[in-house]
Image (tube, rainbow, N blue to C red):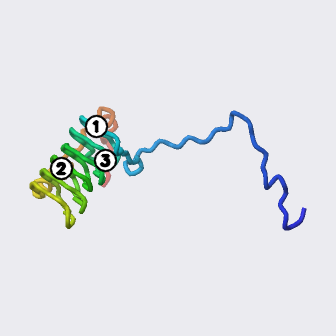
Amino acid sequence: MSVWKKNEAEIDPPMTTSSTVASPTPAPRTDSKSRGLATIGPSIALRGDVTGEEDLIIEGRVEGKVVLKKNSVTIGRNGRVKADLFAKIITVEGEVEGDLSAHEEVIIRQSGKFRGNISAPRVTLDSGCRFQGSIDMEQALAQQAKEAKATEAKPAPKPSAEEKQTTLKPTMGASPQA
């Protein structure tokens, strides 16, 4: 074997034919950022409620209600939606008729056509988009403040029976330590 020539075993490793060789199974995903992205393709038409725990792109037709409160919904350029949408962030590039309620932001892109009411703390209307309806940013901000107060005002949990029993009490004759 020379310095410039590799051993044949290094070039072509032997193939294994064993049926016990398996690829590792990926661990289940638990955080919302890695849950993935769902797409309703251009040839798909849905009637009814759409719910889930992942971001959604709509390129087809949807009629009904779309509820993804902790995730983003994007209506693509080919998307045609007649529905009320509830999401963290809503982006409209296609056509939407219905009410939009976003926890963070609603964005209507230049190619977007929207008819309905928007409730969100932030709203972006790109130059050239088509919009008919109303925008309520105050109600969305008030709702967020109300939710923040509710989480702050939760009372501390009461101790369980076990926790009550483990409370230390001074015994007779012992002097309290400072």
Q: Quadrant of the C terminus?
A: bottom left
Q: Which mark is residue 58?
A: 3
Question: Separation of disc 3 and disc 2 at Cα?
Answer: 15 Å
Q: Nearer the viewer, residue 143 or 38?
A: 38
Q: Nearer the viewer, residue 94 or 53?
A: 94
State which tag comes first along the sequence, 3 or 2: 3
Q: Secondary structure at mark 2?
A: strand
Whole-percent x, y for residue 83 in the image: 19, 43
Tag of residue 46: 1
Which residue in the rendered view is the most extreme toward the right? 1
Instruction: Return the residue at label 2.
Output: 100
In the image, what residue type sits under mark 1? Leu
Residue for point 16% across, 46% down? 98
- For the residues labelled 1 and 3, say whether their Cβ atoms are less than 8 Å apart: no
Residue 168 vs residue 173, the one in the foreground: 168
Q: Earlier in the sequence, mark 1 or mark 2?
A: 1
Above or below, 50 relative to 79: above
Residue 105 visible in image: no
Nearest to the observer: residue 164 or residue 71: 71
